[in-house]
Image: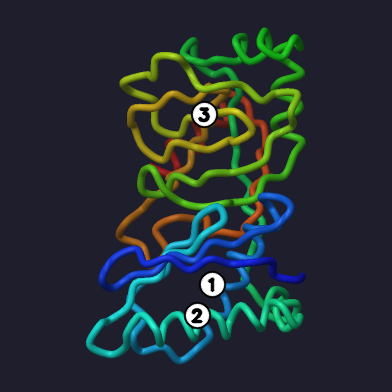
Amino acid sequence: MRSEAININIASENAVIVYFDGPTLKHKNQQVSMFVHLLEQTDTPWLLDIIPAYHSVLITYDIFLTDYFAVKAQVFGLTKALQVGESEQAGLSQESKIVEIPVCYGLSDDNDLQRIAEHNQITVDEVIQIHQQNSYRVYYLGFAPGFAFLGETDEKIATPRLTSPRKKVPKGSVAIADRQTAIYPNVSPGGWNIVGVCPLELFVPEQASPSPFKVGDTVRFKPISEDTYYQTLEQSS
């Protein structure tokens, strides 16, 4: 994969943000994943944190070990590796995985399946079928701990956010906003359209890897019955 133009901006006294360009969001996010992988493989004692997003990466560094100009030079060096094709091998070695998420669609009355169906002029059954038959890329983690932004949904079920967000979205809610989908790992406010609920714990801060997701992973939704939902919920609690 060939890297397109990049921009490096100063984010703070010890951080830079790198923006990737490209023809599609997926293309840009693939560059983000490969760049992060290359950066993690380098010997960089000054590196404090790496925060990937849709088409950008925030890099924080130790100002007592380096400076902006040295960081910028190393960033350009890594993006050159993407440009000359070294990223192909690096991309293959990334530990991206497929994460299967069980979903009980339309479990409670507090869902928006009918709204999504009416907005797109299809049936509720078609909404469920289209949502679960697709595979979704993890574009980034944000908004709340463990909240993974997944995309892209089929245009046939794309639906705008609610005009008035809910004050409390139930834990485990699987939802859609425009062409994105996500799972709320905990109870929180939110304006996405709920289609179902997941019984798994999706953010456990005590674990070495608190979230089952990372940028570049693939998520697939597996429909389950109400009985299976409650059984799995009990087992995972």
Spatial CA span between label 3 and label 1: 32 Å
Residue 70 at x, y = what percent? 40, 87
Residue 200 vs residue 92: left or right? left
**Count of numbered badges drawn on the protein:** 3
Q: Looking at the image, is mark 3 or mark 1 nearer the viewer?
A: 1
Q: Where is the N terminus found, in terms of image quarters?
A: bottom right
- Looking at marks 2 and 3 on the same chain, the residue that comes earlier in the sequence is marked by 2
**Of the residues shown, which amino acid type is indicated by label 2?**
Glu
Snapshot quadrant of residue 157: top right
Q: Where is the C terminus found, in terms of image quarters?
A: top left
Snapshot quadrant of residue 115: top right
Q: Can you identify the residue that label 2 sits on?
A: 40
**Of the residues shown, which amino acid type is indicated by label 1?**
Val
Q: Nearer the viewer, residue 47 or 227?
A: 47
In the displayed structure, would residue 60 be above or below residue 22?
below
Spatial CA span between label 2 and label 3: 34 Å
Q: Can you identify the residue that label 3 sits on?
A: 197
Residue 137 at x, y = what percent? 65, 50
The residue shown at (71%, 50%) is: 24
Classify mark 1: helix, strand or loop: helix
**Residue 36 marker:** 1
Residue 30 vs residue 35: left or right? right
The residue shown at (49%, 36%) is: 199
In the displayed structure, would residue 72 be above or below residue 51?
below
- Circles 2 and 1, Cβ within 8 Å, touching? The answer is yes
